[in-house]
Amino acid sequence: MRQASMHVASLALDETNPRHTHPTSSLEQSIAALLENHPEKLVRLARDISQHGVNPTDLTIVLVDGDRNVVLEGNRRVAALMLLHNPALAPTEKLRKQFAAIARNGEVPRRLACVIAESRMQAEHWIKLKHTGENNGVGTVPWNPGEASRFKGRATPTEKARLFIEAVHAWFPDDLELLANARIVREKRITNLGRMIADPTVRNRLGISVEGDVVLSSFPSARLHPILSRLFSDLAGPVSVDQIYSKRQREDYLQGVEDYLPKLADRLEEPEKYSKSTNTTEGNSKVSVADNDTTEDKKPTRRKRADFEKRLFQGVKLRHVSLRSSEVLEEAQQIKIDEMPNVASIMVRAVVDIVVTEVYEQLGWRRNKDSLKGRIGAVLHQVDPEKNEPLLANAWRLSQEEDGALVLKTLHAFIHSWQSNPLTSEVRKLSLAYGPLLNKADELLEKKKR
């Protein structure tokens, strides 16, 4: 058996699924059979998938049967995905409206991690273990009441939000406005804050995590002060749960406050810690507002930044390029790297090429214009002649220095080689590297207009 990522639209439900009372003969019949008993359970599954994604610890088993990819294990989750993408497959109008509403308010994956079985017999052992109980310890052994109680006793998003507010008090004891907003959030909007910090994308971009009774920060507190001030002000005031309910809305919120977020290059080698049990911080984490100016001048130790971007060129805004170039960027920013790596890889190359070429032509440059490497290099030399801008370090390295072949070969292959199979990590690395270059290129055009 081997693993593969498959498009939901390419999958077929098992017409001999043991969940069916009788074999089915079409997709619509298979879906109706799954909805026949307790349809609310499939609705709840769809809602959970839209909010949290498909359970990554439970892979779908697929049998390639001629031109059909038959789902042997995971028919309910695949049916839920199909109904979210096409509510018209539901047998009743009420269900069609329910699935359509869920799809509008959440994220619906288009690809699914699967295990490819060579035969039904090969998959039978694993399906049996999944659905027939403990099997003397070989299958899944359920928790006893005590174990279940201990798990439920772990911190909920709301409890983590309260702990995070305590850390904010410890980090910024002199910012009365921030603390006042934090108090309002704790008393009236605590679930909204819990929803935000329960989102991995938000946590990664803020550089925070909660482990037990400890809050970890990957950025110096002074770097977090602008975004935390904005976040608590928004949650205490104009931002309601309707504006951050779905994952897409939370990502949109992050894009809207991009200027307040810490620079990724400022991540620490070792995170700062706030401990509830000792009510203390470790590292230089207790920062007053008055100290921010002096702290800003200190260069924190650089750390390899985490891959957090889900969409291409997240946070990049082009205001001075042509309308067409800005529209190309905006459309590219709708692409989810993990779901459409091939399209994402092509658009990385396309957006970079379009923007640097426009800069070349509008500024009337003549030298090095015949190659992408030359055009990128010319923009880099113009915006960072001393090579001392941290945000452009990766653009220099990936296009001009020892790893320059990545642009010449990898970016070229993304478009021109049918053998190219781009990795999402590779696409994300390029998106992160060239995003700052696009912003700097846009600034060059702003200077020209002045």
Image (cartoon, rainbow, N blue to C red):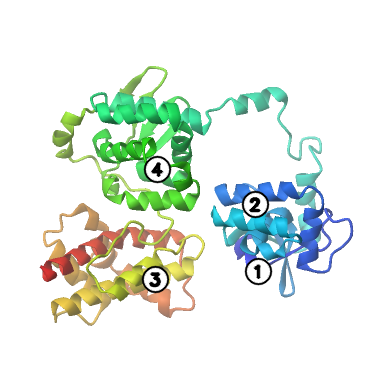
Residue hosting label 4: 239
Asked if the residue at tag 1 contacts the one at tag 4, i.e. Cβ–Cβ closer than 8 Å, the answer is: no
x 37%, y 46%: residue: 205
Question: Which amino acid does the dot numbered 3 rest on?
Answer: Met
Quadrant location, the N terminus: bottom right
Residue hosting label 2: 46
Asked if the residue at tag 2 contacts the one at tag 4, i.e. Cβ–Cβ closer than 8 Å, the answer is: no
Pointer 3 or 1: first along the chain: 1
Element marked by disc 1 = helix
Element marked by disc 2 = helix
Measured in 3D between alpha carbons, the distance from the residue under mark 3 to the one under mark 4, in whole angstroms, is: 33 Å
Measured in 3D between alpha carbons, the distance from the residue under mark 2 to the one under mark 1, in whole angstroms, is: 19 Å
Task: Pinpoint residue 450: horizontal percent, then vertical percent.
Answer: 10, 67
Residue hosting label 1: 10
**Closer to the camera in the image, 311 or 87:** 87
Pointer 2 or 1: first along the chain: 1
Residue found at the far top of this picture: 278
Question: Which amino acid does the dot numbered 2 rest on?
Answer: Ala
Residue hosting label 3: 347
User: Which mark, by number, is residue 119?
Assistant: none
x 16%, y 38%: residue: 298
Task: Pinpoint residue 374: horizontal percent, then vertical percent.
Answer: 21, 75
Q: Nearer the viewer, mark 4 or mark 1?
A: 4
Element marked by disc 3 = helix
Using the image, determine if residue 400 lies above or below residue 139.
below
Q: Residues within 10 Å of mark 2 (few under 14, many from 20)?
A: many
Pointer 4 or 1: first along the chain: 1
Pointer 4 or 2: first along the chain: 2
**Closer to the camera in the image, 159 or 341:** 159
